[in-house]
Amino acid sequence: MCGGEQGCIETVKAALQGGVACIQLRAPGWKKRRLLELANALLALTRPAKVPFLLDDEVDVALACGADGVHVGQRDLPVQTVRDLMGPGALIGLSASNSAQIQQADVAAADYLGVGPVFATQTKTDAAPVLSPEGLATLKALTEKPIVAIGGINHANIGVVAATGVSAAAVVSAICGQPNPLASTQQLAAAWQAGVK
């Protein structure tokens, strides 16, 4: 969505300048070498900024580049296996979209849960049913783990997401592919802060 490697690098530079708290690289279908090259380039940006850098699903690439962690889904490697591979200091996230997934044993080894989709999204075609902010708040009440809300979040609705009390929100199209990623990031951050209770 960022327009290839160089577009991704420029978008990450802008997002870091705008105040993002974490960067995750998700490029499904990419060959491993291409992914590793981009991961190394992004790490060179995130490390000086002291912002964690995660890979989506790709534990081997995360290990190869020295990423700060990995985010996995329900059909990926079990979280405890990822923890064993990445080590105790790695940041490990797990996607969850319903109460059964939030209460499963695998959650114990995760540092945070990515919960959604909160709203309809076109970024991920196989996304679970939409939760709504109310559904997000219901799932948040079931766990002590930090929740990162995801799915269809943009500057117009991120304040409502913040008001549920979740720890953070993840976005893709609200920054990636925007004409001005810096301004988009700053707008999101301001709207999030306005919504925090």
Image: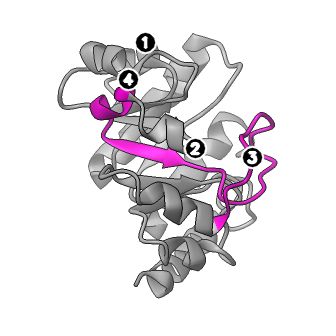
Residue occupied by mark 1: 60
Nearest the viewer among 67 and 125 is 125
101 drawn magenta: no
Residue stretch rendered in magenta on the structure: 105-132
Q: Residues within 10 Å of mark 2 (few under 14, many from 20)?
A: some
Whether residue 68 is visible: no
Q: Quadrant of residue 8?
A: top right
Residue at x 60%, y 61% (from the top left corner)? 135
Whether pointer 4 and pointer 2 mark residues with C-beta atoms closer than 8 Å, the reply is no
Above or below: residue 137 compared with residue 31: below
Whether residue 148 is visible: yes
Residue occupied by mark 3: 129
Above or below: residue 54 compared with residue 74: below
Question: Which percent across, then down, holds residue 121?
Answer: 77, 52
* Label 2 – label 3 distance at C-alpha: 9 Å
Q: Quadrant of the C terminus?
A: bottom left
